[in-house]
Amino acid sequence: MKSYKKIKNKIKNLRPDFTFKKVEDIPINFLIDNHIKLIMFDMDNTLVNYKYAHTDKLKEWIKKAKEQNIKLYILTNCKNEEKVKKVSKKLGIKYIHHASKPRRKGFEDIIKEENVEKKYVLMIGDQIFTDVFGGNNVGVNTVLVEPIDSKEKVVSKVKRPFEKLLKKFFFKERKAN
Ligand SMILES: [Mg+2]
């Protein structure tokens, strides 16, 4: 019985609190209304495409979020620090790389460093099993966005058929609401 409850809770943690098509689509007022003081971003396919490029609109959005005194942090599983550093510099956002999400450590290190209550923290990412599950598991708010590049690498296509199914369901659910 106990383990059933545990599994049920884990499944619950796969569900994002909110879904948006992309980061730039999240209204700044949505952040204000939800009292968000710290945002943790996934990097690959959330902030930048496979060429590590971002849009001008994203840069604009980041500027507006900063004007609201919202703290921003990149939390990425990318192991290549040089690449992460470049994105971090271009966007003016601090980072933790090689984070092994959904492991709690990276999430908790950032929350501790920035000293913000979890209910005012938002995790934004394009992957359910790393970004959404990890964020929900540590008790912060979560946003699932659609990956910037729809052409996923062959590896992840094979690795994530279940994730695709869940995403279809969550994004459909958003449209119905
Ligand atoms: Mg990603």
Image (cartoon, rainbow, N blue to C red):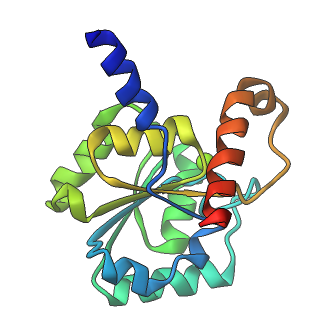
Where is residue 20 drawn, in percent x and y?
Answer: 59, 66
Q: Residue at x 66, y 64 (%)?
A: 176
Where is residue 125 drawn, in percent x and y?
Answer: 54, 53
Q: Is residue 135 placed above or below 63 in the rendered structure?
A: above
**Quadrant where the N terminus lies?**
top left
Q: Is residue 156 left or right of residue 135?
A: right
**Quadrant where the C terminus lies?**
bottom right
Q: Is residue 75 visible?
A: yes
Q: Nearer the viewer, residue 102 or 96?
A: 102
Q: Residue at x 37, y 77 (%)?
A: 31
Where is residue 6 drawn, in percent x and y?
Answer: 32, 20
Q: Is residue 160 left or right of residue 9?
A: right
Q: Is residue 56 placed above or below 97 in the rendered structure?
A: below
Q: Residue at x 48, y 38 (%)?
A: 14
Where is residue 169 drawn, in percent x and y?
Answer: 67, 46
Number of callouts: 0
Q: Nearer the viewer, residue 33 or 63?
A: 33
Q: Is residue 101 visible?
A: no
Q: Is residue 58 left or right of residue 72?
A: right
Q: Is residue 50 left or right of residue 47?
A: right
Q: Residue at x 71, y 66 (%)?
A: 53
Q: Is residue 14 placed above or below 9 in the rendered structure?
A: below
